Image (cartoon, rainbow, N blue to C red):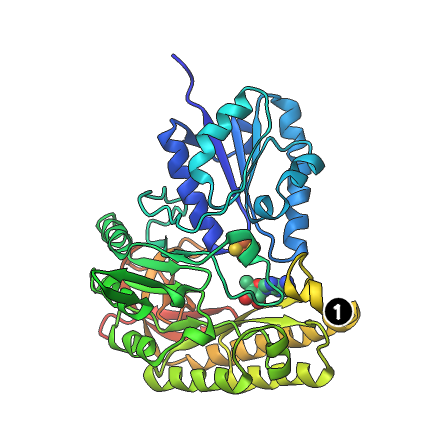
Amino acid sequence: MEEVKKIYLETYGCQMNFSDSEIVASLMQDEGYEICEKSDEADVIFVNTCSIRDNAEQRVRRRLRELKSVKKKNPFVKIGVLGCMAERLKQQLLEEEETVDMIVGPDAYRDLPALLDKVEDGQKAINVILSTSETYADITPVRLDKSGITAFISIMRGCENFCAYCVVPFTRGKERSRDPQTIISEAKALFADGYREVTLLGQNVNSYSWEENGRKINFASLLERVAEVDPLLRLRFATSHPKDISDELLKTIGKHHNICNAIHLPVQSGSSNILKLMKRNYTREWYLDRIAAIKKYVPDCAVSTDVIAGFCSETKQDHQETISLMREVGFDYAFMFKYSERPDTLAQKKLEDDVPKDVKSARLQEIIDLQQQLSHESNKNDIGKTFEVLIEGSSKKSKEFLMGRNSQNKVVVFPKESYAKGDYVHVKITGCTTATLMGEADPLF
Ligand code: 5AD
Ligand code: SF4
């Protein structure tokens, strides 16, 4: 009997990449491969990569060099680079990284079996063709997250916003939405399998758009349809662009208990001058107006953001505007980055990366310190409140405690008692750190 071939998948970058790896796993299982947990047991290793900042790429490069030792032990192992770095660097990556056998861009995963055949024949293989229509709508992802409670559903791909700093429109191609029927079927199947939370994913998730029998379905109407799958299936979505946060969408969130009250809304900068250079298509005032609308229609909504420190020509005054905006909004959480110039982007071609390294670092540190404070304040404000928490599993620190999230996406830890994964439980908050809420189940709530 022939031994079953094994594949090891390693994923870097955003949630979209993790979701893509689940599609790749599905395609490979159909080819008879088994997913394995260790790189040195594998016949094939796929590294699904990220190009968003230079340090993300450097990390992958170091990992590819490390994989040399795996190839030394097992010269037959084949290594494929998938995702954004594959798309950005193409052939160049084959030339620069000798361990790599194949390069596959984010829209070419259906070609993996054919590419692997080529590699088995001793050749190098590459497919980085971007598509205007591929959504992998018919593929049922193999869920790689083992919780069995939360899952991703990818609803659109690509991005055409061309923000001046961003490489994604080049690595992930044109924006395209997925057939809503396939999205709803996927949500129903997940619920039937015991999942209780899905996150709808897209690079610009709220610009989702589909036409069905002459009727337009926008993101708000899609969200509503998925919310109707079952009241016990919670919904989240990421990532939203401020230009597309409509009142209609906010009203839909406010109307449905199972659409979580948490919006990730990257601001990038608090200065309208910088936002203009970034080509974000909104001003500071527009962003603050959208925050006011969130508070109006979804009063207890948590808001998180992304911030870039030290974009081209950013002055001390611009930076201070970012700081003041963060204070004014009082973000619950933030991802914060130093600007990293990316090849071929508008900023790289037209603007100068002129904020000195040490100034960038100091500004980023100030932003991080402020966010720590804001997150802590936001958590302290929750002490005494009771939240509905969906239990995801044991707490990392102790089996005697459970961990879950409230609607606002905050991690809540509380004593296990007789509760179990997948249960909804009301938890009264009694304490917190900057990252976690602690409490006790309140069965009488
Ligand atoms: N440099 C730094 N941060 C970046 N991001 C995107 N491109 C860059 C870049 N060139 C950040 C943005 C985006 C998040 C996913 O990554 O904040 O929202
Ligand atoms: Fe990284 Fe962006 Fe690609 Fe996601 S889409 S992997 S964040 S470059």
Q: Which quadrant holds the C terminus?
A: bottom left
Coordinates of residue 49 in the picture (x, y in percent):
57, 47
Q: For the residue marked with disc 1, what is the amino acid?
A: Glu
> Is residue 233 visible in the rendered structure shown here?
no
In this view, 277 is above or below 193:
below
Coordinates of residue 385 in the picture (x, y in percent):
36, 80
Coordinates of residue 254 in the picture (x, y in percent):
29, 78
Coordinates of residue 148 in the picture (x, y in percent):
33, 49
Residue at left 37%, top 59%?
Answer: 199
Residue at left 58%, top 79%?
Answer: 373
Report the side of 393 relative to 44 (left or right).
Answer: left
In this view, 349 is above or below 103:
below
Quarter of image, res 364: bottom right
Q: Mark 1 = which residue?
A: 352
Report the side of 177 relative to 222 (left or right).
Answer: right
Ligand 2: image quarter: bottom right
Q: How many marks are shown on the rendered structure?
A: 1
> Is residue 148 visible in the rendered structure shown here?
yes
Quarter of image, res 74: top right
Residue at left 57%, top 25%?
Answer: 77
Quarter of image, res 184: bottom left
In this view, 73 is above or below 13:
above
In this view, 203 is above or below 275:
above
Q: Which quadrant holds the N terminus?
A: top left
